[in-house]
Image (spheres, grey):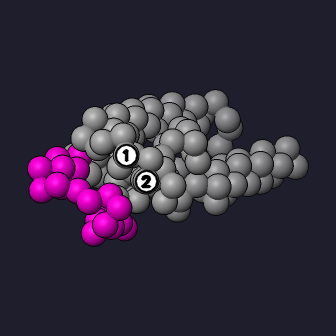
């Protein structure tokens, strides 16, 4: 009975975390840090933002660098999270899962650091006015 309860709790927590963030978001901090590159991509030709060619090149590089890191981590996380879910359902004890959970945490730390660097680099590229517009979008 305790195993079933534990399994249900872990699956519920993973589901809530996934629903609260973007699908499969690999970050530790969800919903608090802006996702500038996604907003910029959706507003690439926005007249208010009025990106220069130099800004566009730099922004594309930031996006490419960030996505390369995050997507690689996302694939690793999906496999590990699936492994934890399967092991819970097969009756593994919590201690047997701790190493996998620690790996998951390390990957989420790396993804969050990449996200923080992305936001910082993006803010350095944009003007104060562009950031104000971006924050309103």
Q: Residue furthest right?
A: 1
Camera-side residue of 43 and 108 = 43
Q: Position of residue 97 (x, y in %)?
A: 58, 37
Q: Give the residue pinned by disc 1.
A: 129
Which numbered circle lies on residue 108? none
Q: Position of residue 77 (x, y in %)?
A: 44, 48
Q: Residue at x 35, y 49 (%)?
A: 130
Q: Give the residue pinned by disc 2.
A: 133
Q: Residue at x 68, y 38 (%)?
A: 93
Camera-side residue of 109 and 124 = 124
Q: Position of residue 80 (x, y in %)?
A: 47, 48
Q: How far apart are the two marked residues, 1 and 2, measured between alpha carbons?
A: 6 Å
Cβ–Cβ below 8 Å for labels 1 and 2?
yes
Q: In the rendered structure, which segment of residues is drawn in magenta? A: 41-62
* Residue 120 figure quarter: top left
* Residue 52 figure quarter: bottom left
Q: Give yes or no for residue 50 being in the magenta stretch.
A: yes
Q: Could you say whether the residue bearing mark 2 is in a helix, strand or loop?
A: helix
């Amino acid at each position: 009975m305790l195993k079933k309860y534990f399994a249900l709790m872990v699956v519920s927590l993973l589901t809530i975390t996934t629903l609260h963030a973007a699908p499969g978001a690999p970050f530790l901090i969800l919903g608090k840090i802006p996702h500038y590159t996604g907003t910029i991509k959706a507003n690439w030709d926005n007249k208010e933002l009025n990106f220069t060619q130099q800004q566009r090149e730099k922004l594309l590089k930031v996006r490419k660098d960030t996505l390369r890191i995050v997507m690689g981590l996302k694939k690793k996380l999906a496999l590990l999270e699936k492994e934890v879910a399967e092991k819970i359902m097969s009756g593994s004890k919590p201690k047997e899962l701790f190493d996998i959970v620690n790996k998951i945490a390390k990957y989420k730390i790396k993804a969050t650091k990449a996200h923080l660097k992305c936001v910082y680099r993006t803010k350095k590229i944009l003007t104060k006015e562009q950031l104000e517009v971006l924050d309103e979008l």
